[in-house]
Amino acid sequence: MGSETVKSRGGRSLRRLLDRESSLGIILMLPGALLLIIFMAYPFFLGIWLSLTDSVIGEMGDFIGFRNYTDLLGDSIFHQTARNTLIYALVTVPFKAMLGLGLAMVLSNRMRFSNPIRAAVMMPWIVPTALSTLGWFMILDPVFSPISWLLRSLGVIKQNINFLGDPILAISSVCLVNIWRGIPFFGITILAGLQAVPQELHEAAAIDGANAWHRFIHITIPTIRGVVLIAALLSIIWTFADFQLIYILTKGGPANTTHIFGTYAYQIGLSATDIGQGAAIALYMFPILAVFAILLLMYLRRD
Amino acid sequence: MAKVVLENISKMFGKVAAVKNCDLTVEDKEFVILVGPSGCGKSTALRMVAGLEEPTTGTIYIGDRAVNDLPPKDRDIAMVFQEYALYPHMSVYKNMAFALKLRKFPKEEIDQRVREASDILGIQDLLDRKPKQLSGGQRQRVAVGRAIVRKPAVFLFDEPLSNLDAKLRVQMRAELSKLHDRLQTTIIYVTHDQVEAMTMGTKIVVMKDALIQQIGTPLGVYNFPVNLFVAGFIGSPVMNFIPCRVLSKDGRLMIDAEAFQLPIPEKKAPYYQALAGSEAFFGIRPNDIYDRLFAPEHLKENAIRAVVDVIEPLGSEIHLNVTAGKHNLVAMVDTQTNVRMHQEIELAIDLNKMHLFEKNPPNLRIAAE
Amino acid sequence: MVGSETLGKRVLGIYLPLAFFIFFLLFPFYWMSLVSFKPTNDLFELKYNPFWLQTFTLENYLYLFQNTDFSEWLKNTLIISVVSTVLSLGCSILIGYALARLRFPGSNFLGVGIFLAYLVPPTLLFIPLSQVIAKLNLYNTYWALILTYPTQLIPFASWLLMGYFRTIPKEIEECAMADGCTRMQALVKIILPLSLPGMISAGIFCFTLCWNEFLYALIFMSSGPMKTIPVGTVSDLIKADTLFWGALMASAVLGSFPIAFLYSFFVKYYVEGLTAGAVKR
Ligand SMILES: Nc1ncnc2c1ncn2[C@@H]1O[C@H](COP(=O)(O)OP(=O)(O)OP(=O)(O)O)[C@@H](O)[C@H]1O
Ligand SMILES: [Mg+2]
């Protein structure tokens, strides 16, 4: 093709690779893709393999088929774990969404200091969860809880409440903290959705005689449905696969009543060194995560 | 400074052909206009010359080099885009100096060239501004300035005037023509505006549906369009086309359009003889139709009657939309013409300027000279 | 929103709920800071109102620096976060650019793949990943986290940057190439300066995530002085019997502060990034 004389073959062909879209595209993907392959894709398949073996830490085990999975089906703690995870991931979502919507509606009003206020209410989402959870750890402490102190001073209770020591209270508490952490995320996402609604729409509706409630139902809700759905799906996926919040507050206790997949896999796989079984616990999450991921993908690519 | 040759160039986007089997030679210092309707592949052709798209087949030469394998930066071309594509984060000066800096020109030379270009374009006072602070016309000048500081072998323009208002467009049109005169460089200029095509170029290339239809001088294409499409595309207002039948009557060849019959001039008759008895399109430009009252004497005998539907007085002339039988025509008539809507008028037709086109695609024009 | 409202209505409809949200969302931080400035003895004094400060002290913070590895943790967290952010940002710029601008075989498929990678949670992978890290001999080295964090950062950052790159007209870049840039030069000289806001959002996002990460740090950095702040605080300051509440809270406050500070500086970018398509974990 080229009628020029070719001088340095190597240098030129590299340059051509970098100039041509098809090869350049692949070259640019490479560094990131390599990291993702080594530290994400490979471990994923390794995990599948491990879950089919009786490996323990430091020792590759033998292939045992689906025994790890079937064993878990008969494990009552695993049943509890699965139940907890569903509660933790699903029951909290409506609360986060409603309170987030409320927060967004409040923040969407013109007011003084709106920027610092927005920044402040984002904090639960921004700061390291492990550290803010430590704050809650103390707030829910059987001895030092300020909640107990307040209720005691008011005469409502006689004895401190053991928030994290009682099974029902414990799961409620971790859900509460999770809701606390998730509200700002929903709030800010919905706020962005609200701000996409043109003000004229509200004004036109008001002129047409719609009251605040009608405007909320017929204008606000339809326009934010999409962002709420996306936020909810993401939130479900993340909460489902959470770890740190529960690890710090209860370590799965009392008596394994607050374990979720992540913490239980950690306990079995790493603390008890039974990696094969641990990997199987973690992989039980996969189908459910996949369903939500696909729902999300489908929603995002609907048009 | 360089000749550009496209040799059997095609470009496919998936299954869509944007350019098909294009052969084109742009001589050194020529101002070539690529013109055609939207989506016909003009930009794609230009972008292949620039090196922004790779041709699917064929070879492109700039100067004597085949440049298929060269990236844009090594092709010694400068390109001006429709949206100007000024670098928003750089001042006008930096925008213009950017290419020279990349080529490691000494500072003094960069400065001198930028000043020179900004003098030519009258943008000396804008050098410190950011593109955002410029009007459309000013941006346009900066985009041109950025191209000329380079002194490239070839200038490529992709509809550079289409975002300007009508007045500014007329002015810039003239300025670009002057610029070409002054720089004496090869220019390839894409537009879908046939006025730009007629007035600016030394050669025009008419494209349609990825194919080159005709290459020629502006007047050549205007007077001798190869087919119905080119005839309709070049010239404003658009040429009238009337389906008709060619008859041989009393030894004379006639146009029969049902509503009227017109004799074919003796000069042209031999060329059209083969068509006798068959159908064709009769083409006549609006400016070759006269109000019979004000027509030159020798044209008065070939007249038709028509009813006036719309009158558009433009000051220097009047455009009439008329109906003759079931055919609609546009006529450009003398300003003294005094007609009212729905009135009948007699129109004289200069049949020496008539064209005949084949009935079936590709609707070739029957050469008659 | 529409029409004029009376003050009473505004209080009921806006300020009251706002007060509730602020109280609920910020109380834990108030509590943490409060305790961090309290002498330990005051905590046990039942007659004191726990919601207020009787005596102010910095002893908890001093304790943190003198008797624990906090300064090491701080250094570790900082180094790991910065290096991992830079690495991820670099990879993401390239990926985002390739997906936004280049036509190459498999680009659609890779785009979806990157999006799905964004949804893969660490809990799904940590057990096999711990084996990989062990194989590579990376336990208790910075590399263990520097190399694994990008798997959580690159997908979102690429996605975000891709969106930014797409907003920049293609012609500007093509013009730069006609002006004499290679593609890479056009990326560096034209595209990157123009997408600075996007890079800031992506950078903040990455940095925050690195700083906050817990699970991988917990597993891969088990030796005392190699820990990061969240892991060090949780695992070294919570001793089963005696809890140094003051120091614990001081550590939590100090560990949160850089992020809160960074964030309040760049709220706009962060929120932009967050709403650009999605979100931090
Ligand atoms: N990157 C692309 N991918 C796919 N198809 C393309 C691409 N670029 C152009 N095309 C198609 O190629 C054809 C020619 O496009 P081109 O841009 O060259 O038209 P044009 O003559 O410049 O039109 P306009 O006057 O509207 O600018 C069109 O059908 C267009 O849809
Ligand atoms: Mg075009």
Image: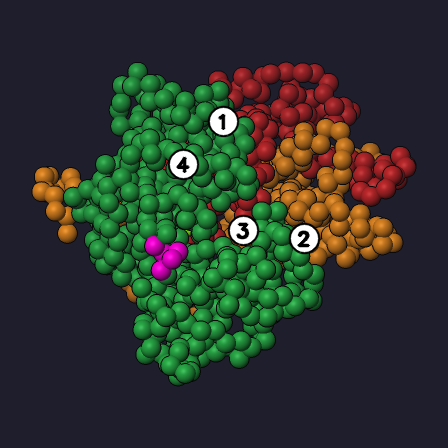
Chain colours: A orange, B green, C red
Identified by mark 1, the residue type is Lys
Q: Are marks 4 and 3 on the same chain?
A: no
Q: Chain of mark 1?
A: B
Q: Are marks 2 and 3 on the same chain?
A: yes
B20 is higher (above) or lower (below) than C91: below
Q: Which residues are magenta?
A: B220-224
Q: Are marks 3 and 1 on the same chain?
A: no
Which residue carries the number 4 mark?
A: B176
Label of residue B281 in the image: none
Percent x, y of residue C134 = 30, 44
Identified by mark 2, the residue type is Ile
Instruction: For marks 3 and 1, give the one nearer the viewer.
Output: 1
Label of residue B130 in the image: 1
Secondary structure category for the residue under label 1: loop
Residue depicted at x 61% and y 51%? B335
Task: Report, in whole angstroms, how far the alpha carbon at label 2 lies from the one at label 3.
Answer: 21 Å
Percent x, y of residue C169 = 45, 42
Which residue carries the number 2 mark?
A: A224
Secondary structure category for the residue under label 4: helix
